Amino acid sequence: MRVTLHNRYLNVVDNTKGAELNSIKGPNQTEYLWQADSDYWGWHAPILFPIVGRLVNNQYRYQGHTYQMHQHGFARQSQFKVDSASDTQVTFELKSSTRTHKLYPFDFDLKVSYKLVAHTVQVQIKVNNVSDKELWFSTGSHPGFNLPLRHDGATFEDYHLTVAPKKVYPRIILKNSLNDVQHPIKADMRTPLNLTHKLFNNDAFVLSLHGHQTTLMLSTFKDNNGVAVTVYNCPYVGVWSPYPKRAPFACIEPWWGLADNYYHHGEFTKKTAINKLSSHQDFTARFDITVF
C-alpha cells in the first residue's frame, strides 16, 4: 500500500512494502528518486535490516546455529504496517515473527519514519530490543537518485560528489562486495569528485565517517538542481551505481554497519561494525534527504 505525503515544496510517496520511499518530487514535478527500472536496479530506496551488504556465503552463525540471509537483510522485502500518518509524516512498523525468526533469532520492533520539513525528507530508523536478551544488528538505507535530474542535456558524468566537511577521508575498499577494512586508502574530498561509471568498478565508494555529521551532495554545474544527504552519528556511507552498466542514477547510502569482512569466518557477534542492544534498549539512526 502506498502512502502519500505532501507539503508546500514536496510530494513524496512511501510504500508499506519495505517501508520504502518510492518517489520524491520537488518543484516543477522534478522526480529526484530512482524509479526502480529493473534493467539496471529494481529498487528505489530500500531499508537495510538486520544486515548491511553481503554475508560470506550468505550465512552467519549465532550461538551454535547457522542462519541463511541474503544481501541487505529481509526488511526491504517485508510488509510493514502503518503505525501513524498525517499529511507530512508517516511511521511504518515491522515486528519480529515466526517468519523472521527463521532468518534472525531476535525479537525486535523496527520503526521507519519519514517527515517532510520544507525541502527535506527527514528519515529515522528505530530498532527496539523487546526481549530480555541482547540483540545484534546492522541497519541503513539505500536511496537512489536520478542522474541527470532534468532532461536538459546533462549526463551522469556531468555530476560530481561534494562532501562536507571537506577533508581527506579513510576509504574502505570492497572485494567481491566484502569489506577490507584492515587496509583503507585515502579519499581526498577537499574538492568535488567527478562521477564516472568506472568509479564503481569495485562496487560502492565507501567512506568512513567516524560518526561525524556529514553532508554528501550530488549536483552539476549545468543547472541548479541537486540532492544532498546529511547523516548523523553514522559510521559509514557508500556511494554506488551498478557497473559495468551505465545506469542513469547513483545512490548515497547511510550505513550503521558494513558487509562482512573479507576475512570473516561467520560468527555474527564478531561481524565488522555490528551493533549490540541490551535488553529493552533502543537505537535510532537518522539522516536527511534535501532536494533543490
Image (cartoon, rainbow, N blue to C red):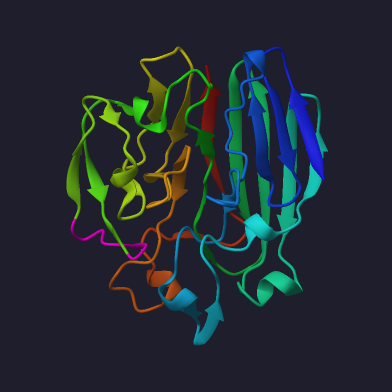
* In this picture, residue 11 sits left or right of residue 286: right
**Residue 69 rendering spot, x and y as whole percentages:** 55, 72
**Residue 209 rendering spot, x and y as whole percentages:** 32, 40
Q: Front-most of 9 and 145?
A: 145
- For the view shown, which residue lies furthest in the front direction? 153
**Residue 18 rendering spot, x and y as whole percentages:** 68, 52
Q: How many marks?
A: 0
- Specify whether residue 129 is in view: no
User: Is residue 7 positioned above or below 247 on the image?
Assistant: above
Query: Which residues fall within the magenta stretch?
Result: 176-183
Magenta segment, prevailing SS (helix, strand or loop): loop
User: Is residue 2 positioned above or below 259 on the image?
Assistant: above
> Residue at image x 44%, y 13%?
223
User: Is residue 233 positioned above or below 173 on the image?
Assistant: above
* Res. 90 image quadrant: top right
**Residue 228 rendering spot, x and y as whole percentages:** 46, 26
Q: Front-most of 238 and 85?
A: 238
* Res. 94 image quadrant: bottom right
- For the view shown, which residue lies furthest in the bottom direction? 64
> Residue at image x 62%, y 63%?
74
* In this picture, residue 27 sits left or right of residue 48: right
Query: Does the magenta portion include 261?
Result: no
* In this picture, residue 232 sits left or right of residue 190: right
Q: Quadrant of the N terminus?
A: top right
Q: Front-most of 69 and 196?
A: 196
* In this picture, residue 12 sits left or right of residue 121: right
> Residue at image x 34%, y 66%?
176
* Res. 101 image quadrant: bottom right
User: Is residue 195 positioned above or below 219 on the image?
Assistant: below
- Specify whether residue 84 is in view: yes
